[in-house]
Image: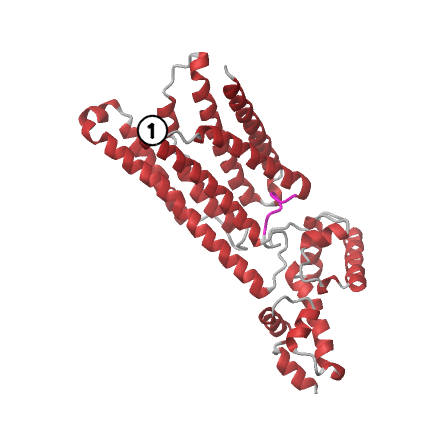
Amino acid sequence: MNIGELLFLVFCSIAVVNVLFMTIYVWLQRERNTIPSLILCTFLIIVAERIVKLLLNDLKGDFGLNINFTQAYFLLPTIALIGPLLHFYIRSVSLKSFKFQWPDILHLIPFTIIFLLLLAVYSDTFRMIFSNYIYSLHYLITTIILIQPLVYIIYSFRYSSVLIKNSKECNSPKENINPYWIRNIVFAISLIWILDLMYSFEAYTKINTNANTIEPIFYSFFIFCMLFLELRYKRITFITNFTSRLKSSILPIQEILRYKSILLDYIKEKEVYKDHDITLGRLAKELSMTPHLLSQIINEQFSCNFNDFINSYRIEEAKLMLADKGKNNFTIASIAYDCGFNTLSAFNTAFKKFTGLTPSQFRAREK
């Protein structure tokens, strides 16, 4: 075993250990966000399976393993599952009403078709009867394997762009997730697709792309980043864009009321709602609470989500400024900004939601 093979073994081993640890950790934390965590666990198992295939294929010569790893690799086309998993994951963390339904099974049709085609291709009987079409069928299968996840990736990028646009327009500070995180997730998955594109290019052109070396290194780095973000910031298992899944608090009511009082006092003293970039996570950190606890207190004690809670303070501040005759020379846009809104459209939308009037109508009424 040369130094290159040794490094390959090390990176594969690190990646597998990290993946397995992350899978177990996410599974144990699934009550925080059940559906996304289960989807993530499935994805991590697929990652582990891909790395193990690479590792065994590299070591088969050293250990005399009499297995056709090329055939074993393609007989389970897990790349065809990554697209649907990505689709389900980003929707489950961004849609309040998301739940699996029977039509979602249709997303597994490409995987099933590819799997059945590969079974036929690697069947001795099929190869004898249709030997002249084997190569063409391989091209067809490879094309489907590459196009199917690409469609999901393109759709997911567009979906994340819509979330980012809506976030800017509605001035949503996000409860536990920034929509840019979703775009980063899609970007990471697109790198996996690029690796499979490199494998296909290598298989049909005979040009070495070193994809089998890059893949374990990528997975090692990718999973390490996931572990860091989860263990340090709880970015993975808390990833959600709403609070409705939170269970009723198991804390004594006295503790809940104490935390509520701390929150209200801090809001009044620091006026954090005027901060354009305030987030649930940052406010929770300033209050020495977990994001889960703070979100639960707001949800239970004020019957609203974090966005509406912060905006309620901003609107009250705006009402005072709009009614102040000494500030008649202030534009509505400047008042919106001073109260914590990033855009005038977000301010107008929130103001009408809370008061039933536009800022201009409210100011005219107060004159």
Residue 298 in the image: above or below residue 25: below
Residue 331 image offset from top left, x and y in percent: 66, 78
**Is residue 154 something one can see in this rendering?**
yes
**Is residue 102 something one can see in this rendering?**
no
**SS for tag 1?**
loop
Q: What's under tag 1, amino acid-wise?
A: Lys
- Is residue 147 toward the left or the right of residue 318 in the image? left
Q: Residue at x 36, y 40 (%)?
A: 146
Residue 162 image offset from top left, x and y in percent: 49, 59
Q: Main secondary structure of the magenta part?
A: loop
Of the 4 image quadrants, the one containing the C terminus is bottom right
From the viewer's side, name the closer residue of 82 and 341. 341
Q: Which residues are magenta?
A: 234-240
- Total number of numbered discs in the rendering: 1
From the viewer's side, name the closer residue of 62 and 121. 62
- Is residue 67 toward the left or the right of residue 94 in the image? left
Residue matched to label 1: 206
Residue 115 image offset from top left, x and y in percent: 34, 34
Q: Residues within 10 Å of mark 1 (few under 14, many from 20)?
A: few
Residue 309 part of the magenta-drawn span? no
Residue 365 image offset from top left, x and y in percent: 67, 85
Q: Residue furthest top?
A: 64
Instruction: Please tell me in which quadrant of the rendered image residue 341 appears.
Output: bottom right
Tell me how the rendering is colored: secondary structure
Q: Residue furthest front?
A: 207
- Is residue 320 toward the left or the right of residue 3 in the image? right
Q: Residue at x 51, y 21 (%)?
A: 4
Q: Residue at x 67, y 74 (%)?
A: 334
